Image: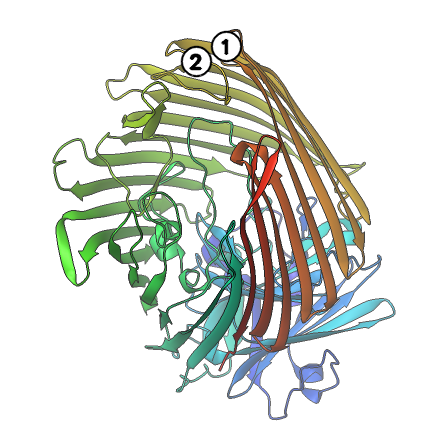
């Protein structure tokens, strides 16, 4: 019995490979119908094996987590079922009724690794209000909560405890029908006491959903392959648009997404003329660096198994980034005409991915076809993987041979069997007409972590002709403010970090973290370019409030003149040394009223930067959030380089009339971008994974004291998951 095994568990952490031998739970087929209503009244639940005696994961690692959690599994021909009883000694905390928000709510979730990879997993959970959360977990990229699928879950709240039932259709999972054991773990969040619990003994230095530390769900007979595993999601949309002084224009559109199984472990996705109007708008940020920023992918078509393509490169250099698909060379959106993907496992230890997309043309860019092929071979927690990416321009149906680019990558990762030590290396090359040399990117690094220490070091060499037309390269383009152009300059970078964490077992403090970071950047000839040193301190209290402080010292050999303000002469290309101090505070996140404040004071190149941020949110549990955030940036440089005040205001209102009817409104004003806008979205989920969206968009150009309408639109979209 699991409980007996847990009691005799030693504090010494076992090898990852031993987890399934110690934590085991039988999963037997039911002969009765399971009604997913949160009421555990079926006889099957009384007879099923029980996983209990959870381990405390936070605020510190300990056995015999309290309050008690009991979890059982069963299955029938079509579904895997989980039932949970969660004893609740504190008030239930529900931050939102919005789907895919798990970590700030009381809730419980399963972690499934059907192919026993110990690296990738599905996650399905519910909050204590019955709100669903689903995600995929992958190394490096972590949890992808934007991935969603169709399944069922309900809860029932009683005096002193709550219960949950979840049904996961086999058709949405990728599994081998010969496996008698699946990797499985459970994570429970209890916000009232600020604790997370795991069924297995996940070490302190690892995030709770990490499937490396999963136990075993042991089947009496493995589930059979399911035929007819497909989804078709057609949509129709209509919108009214008005730009500046133009007449109102009506547009209509239609398209579809489809998903079907090629095998029980390989999945295909097809999209034709997709429309992304329902996707949440990006929140703009004030950028006071010399380089561009990185925004995450949210579009549904690209999300499942996205790590197969996206987990190449490191930090500031990524060979393939799907956010580049659907943008022209000026960063403006162009239509995605179609997309086709096949991703998943060819065998239990070989993952593959193939993708092809085609985008329409714009005034500044031709029509483009993009292809990506990736493969990964697992060796326990280690792997070797390769990627090939191609982009080809078209003039109608004729390829423009001179307008194409290709990238190839080969990477390897060695990770010790306990997950504590890692070494990685990568070699990347781009192929573009007219650029035959200096077109490589190479990186080498390692990491060590235990319950107290986390240290890492990585060195990369990025040559000036390494192009990532379908990727992201943070600092290859250097803007020259005098000539008003960007100049490609390769760079070499060495980053080293060290963090030490203390987790007191008594008192009001959950953990202290002291960290150090050293980043050295060199020019291609290894002459000095930039140094960033930081010393940081983080303090988290048991009531979830947080304090962070940091001291940064920077030295920059500016290669080209650059300006951070709209008026004044650019800063000259010379050496700058400056130091600044940061301090921030976030209040108790469980309270109905939450607030945050932060400041950065000190030098900035030849001048100074004083930054202040204030944020507040009021919650009416569980149905409403009213939030506002203000940012103040005062830049001062010596004459003749100018001064400027840059501000930003963001307000977000979310009202959940029910779990299936959510209204979200985002207001943004960012004077650095001369932008002010409103995006208001009403989402009605009238059937599982089937939605009606009503979206209102009102954007303005703000030039000084003048405010001019740039775009105003109302869109209605309906999609149905068949």
Q: Is residue 31 above or below residue 251?
A: below
Q: Residue at x 62, y 19 (%)?
A: 581
Let me know if residue 148 appears in the view: no
> In this figure, which residue is indicated by the disc labeled 2?
571
The residue closer to the viewer here, 332 or 493, is 332
Mark 2 vs mark 1: in front = 2
Q: Which quarter of the figure is the N terminus placed in?
A: bottom right
Q: Is residue 513 above or below residue 311?
A: above
**Residue farthest right in this picture:** 159
Relative to 87, 37 lies left or right:
left
> In this figure, which residue is indicated by the disc labeled 1?
606
Q: Residue at x 46, y 48 (%)?
A: 418
Q: Residue at x 65, y 58 (%)?
A: 102
Q: Is residue 556 above or below residue 487?
A: above
Q: Are marks 2 and 1 in contact (CB under 8 Å)?
A: yes
Residue 99 placement: quadrant: bottom right
């Amino acid at each position: 019995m699991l409980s007996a095994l847990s009691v005799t568990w030693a504090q010494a952490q076992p090898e990852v490979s031993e987890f399934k031998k110690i934590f085991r739970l039988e999963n037997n087929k039911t002969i009765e119908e399971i009604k997913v209503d949160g009421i555990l009244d079926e006889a099957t639940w009384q007879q099923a094996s029980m996983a209990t005696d959870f381990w405390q994961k936070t605020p510190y690692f300990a056995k015999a987590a309290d309050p008690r959690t009991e979890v059982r599994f069963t299955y029938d021909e079509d579904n895997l079922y989980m039932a949970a009883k969660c004893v609740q000694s504190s008030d239930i905390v529900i931050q939102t009724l919005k789907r895919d928000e798990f970590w700030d709510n009381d809730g419980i979730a399963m972690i499934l690794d059907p192919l026993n990879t110990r690296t990738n997993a599905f996650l399905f959970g519910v909050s204590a209000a019955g709100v669903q959360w689903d995600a995929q977990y992958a190394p490096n990229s972590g949890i992808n909560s934007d991935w969603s699928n169709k399944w069922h879950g309900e809860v029932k709240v009683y005096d002193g405890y709550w219960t949950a039932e979840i049904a996961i259709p086999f058709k949405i999972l990728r599994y081998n029908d010969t496996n008698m054991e699946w990797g499985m773990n459970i994570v429970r969040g209890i916000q009232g006491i600020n604790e997370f619990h795991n069924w297995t003994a996940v070490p302190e230095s690892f995030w709770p959903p990490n499937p490396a530390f999963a136990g075993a769900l042991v089947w009496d007979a493995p589930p059979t392959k399911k035929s007819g595993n497909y989804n078709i999601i057609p949509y129709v949309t209509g919108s009214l648009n008005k730009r500046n002084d133009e007449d109102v224009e009506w547009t209509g559109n239609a398209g579809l997404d489809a998903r079907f199984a090629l095998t029980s472990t390989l999945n295909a996705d097809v999209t034709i003329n997709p429309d992304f109007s329902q996707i949440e708008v990006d929140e703009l940020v004030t950028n006071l660096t010399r380089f561009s920023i990185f925004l995450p992918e949210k579009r549904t078509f690209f999300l499942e198994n996205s790590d197969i393509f996206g987990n190449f490169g490191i930090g500031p250099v990524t060979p393939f980034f799907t956010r580049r698909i659907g943008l022209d060379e000026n960063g403006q959106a162009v239509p995605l005409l179609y997309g086709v993907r096949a991703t998943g496992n060819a065998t239990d230890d070989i993952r593959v991915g193939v993708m092809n997309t085609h985008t329409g043309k714009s005034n500044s860019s031709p029509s483009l076809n993009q292809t990506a092929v990736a493969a990964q071979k697992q060796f326990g927690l280690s792997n070797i993987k390769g990627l090939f990416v191609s982009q080809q321009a078209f003039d109608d149906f004729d390829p423009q041979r001179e307008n194409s680019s290709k990238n190839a990558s080969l990477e390897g990762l060695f990770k010790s069997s306990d997950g504590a030590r890692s070494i990685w290396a990568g070699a990347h090359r781009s192929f573009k007409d007219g650029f035959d040399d200096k077109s490589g990117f190479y990186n080498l690094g390692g990491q060590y972590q235990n319950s107290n220490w986390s240290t890492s070091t990585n060195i990369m060499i990025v040559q000036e002709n390494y192009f990532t037309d379908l990727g992201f390269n943070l600092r290859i383009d250097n803007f020259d403010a005098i000539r008003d152009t960007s100049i490609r300059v390769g760079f070499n970078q060495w980053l080293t970090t060290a963090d030490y964490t203390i987790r007191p077992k008594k008192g009001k403090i959950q953990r202290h973290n002291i960290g150090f970071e050293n980043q050295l950047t060199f020019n291609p000839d290894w002459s000095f370019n930039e140094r960033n040193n930081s010393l940081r301190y983080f303090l988290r209290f048991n009531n979830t409030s947080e304090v962070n402080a940091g001291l940064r010292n920077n030295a920059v050999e500016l290669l080209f003149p650059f300006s951070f303000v709209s008026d004044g002469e650019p800063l000259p290309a010379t050496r700058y040394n400056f130091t600044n101090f940061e301090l921030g505070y976030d209040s108790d996140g469980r309270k109905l009223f939450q607030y945050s404040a932060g400041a950065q004071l000190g030098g900035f190149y030849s001048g100074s930067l004083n930054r202040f941020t204030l944020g507040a949110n009021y919650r009416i549990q569980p149905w409403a959030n009213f939030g506002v955030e203000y940012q103040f940036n005062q830049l001062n440089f010596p004459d003749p380089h100018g001064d400027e005040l840059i501000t930003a205001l963001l307000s977000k209102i979310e009202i959940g009339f029910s779990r299936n009817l959510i209204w979200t409104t985002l207001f943004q004003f960012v004077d650095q971008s001369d932008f002010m806008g409103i995006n208001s979205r009403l989402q009605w989920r009238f059937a599982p994974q089937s939605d009606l969206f009503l979206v209102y968009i009102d954007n303005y150009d703000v030039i000084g004291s003048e405010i001019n309408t740039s775009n105003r639109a109302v869109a209605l979209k309906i999609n149905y998951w068949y």
